[in-house]
Amino acid sequence: MDRGGVEQRVRWRAGRMAWMLGLGLAVSSGASALELGERLSLHGYGNLTAVRSGVAPGGQGGGEQDSHYDVSLLGTWRLTDRDKLWLQVAVNRELAGPRVDWAMFDRQLDARTSLHLGQVRLPFGLDNELRDIEALRPTASRPFLYDEDLGLADEAVRGVAVEHETTLAGRPATWTAFAGLALVPDVDAPLPGPVLGGRLRVETAVPGLSLSLSGYRARVAPEAGEPRSGKHAWALSARWQPARWTLQTEWARGRIDERALQTFHLSAAHPLSDTVEAALRVERVQSDRTQSRQDGNDQRRLVLGVAWAVTPVVGVRLEWQRHRGHALPLLAAQEHGGGGGHLRARWSSAVLSLNAVF
């Protein structure tokens, strides 16, 4: 019997058991965190997802999987009224075993300034800090900007971040500056090297409208022993919440070594009832913007999704996607040693996901 296949099945069963354990904790604890004392609490979230894709003529292909799981447990320990420790451990199908997502010491320097030290979520865009919590999204999928294969927005940075609340032109604003010694992707090994960046968020005079500008520069090594290469990205983001709508858009550009990247998305979400929300997202990604409108470098996607909160802690998400081009499936195929020449130019996919949070 193939050893790799056995190991894959063992990891899948172990992950499914971890997901069911997390679901059990969520259901038993209700929507709030588990309080393990006056200063210690435990949060958890996860999803079990099935994907059906038509990007390859023979069925599944281009890095999309028939099914995957993701389970995260986040513990917080309040040391003093000003000091807190954060530790998040995750398991999913892509990992050989559990890994640390967050490991952070948090110090409140004053009423408006905080210091974060350790492995901190990369402050980038609108949703990077919440990228794993599917229950907070109206769709099962994340926008292209946060896709692991694209690599523009990594999951975390190892270093220090300072966050400060202030005003800009009389409006509330928050700026974050960070520096680190490595970027940490979603599932791949950390990328060692210097990192420097920041983010500015501003609440505008228009009710419900906030703007954000974020960016970073780094010189990282893709593999141990390899020379460092340049990596940088910036993003302009906006979120507007008029009445019961949530409208969001982001435009990002960057470069990884010699590869010039660009992505854009526009989304709208609106509740249909107290427990059901519908969402629409249109987006585009260019894995090499110097060669646009080629199927292997340019991908466009229309996403229609429905999110149903079955209980305060358990939800279901159903999503349909229509694609033109296959830039990201091609990157995924190349990452795994394939050529990706068989991928379709126009294709559809469907996603069904069960998620839980407490």
Image (tube, rainbow, N blue to C red):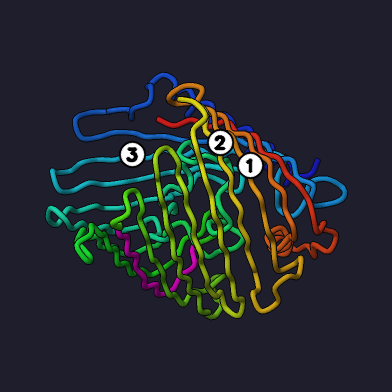
Which label sits on residue 304? 1
Q: Count every numbered label the image shows and give the total.
A: 3
Lower position in the chain sequence, tag 1 or tag 3 = 3
Q: Nearer the viewer, residue 351 or 75?
A: 351
Which label sits on residue 278? 2
Q: Nearer the viewer, residue 10 or 115?
A: 115
Asked if residue 319 lies in the magenta stretch, the reply is no
Q: What range is drawn magenta here?
A: 190-203
The reply to whether callout 2 and callout 1 are in contact (CB within 8 Å) is yes
State which mark lies toward you, 1 or 3.
1
Q: Give the SS element for disc 1.
A: strand
Quadrant in which the C terminus is drawn: top left
CA distance for labels 1 and 3? 34 Å
Asked if residue 202 lies in the magenta stretch, the reply is yes
Quadrant in which the N terminus is drawn: top right
Disc 3 target residue: 75
On screen, residue 192 above or below 42: below
Q: Which residue ends up furthest to the right in the rendered image?
A: 58
Q: Does 109 sit left or right of 337 as displayed?
A: left
Task: Using the rendered view, name the quadrant where residue 5 is placed.
Answer: top right
Residue type for callout 2: Ala
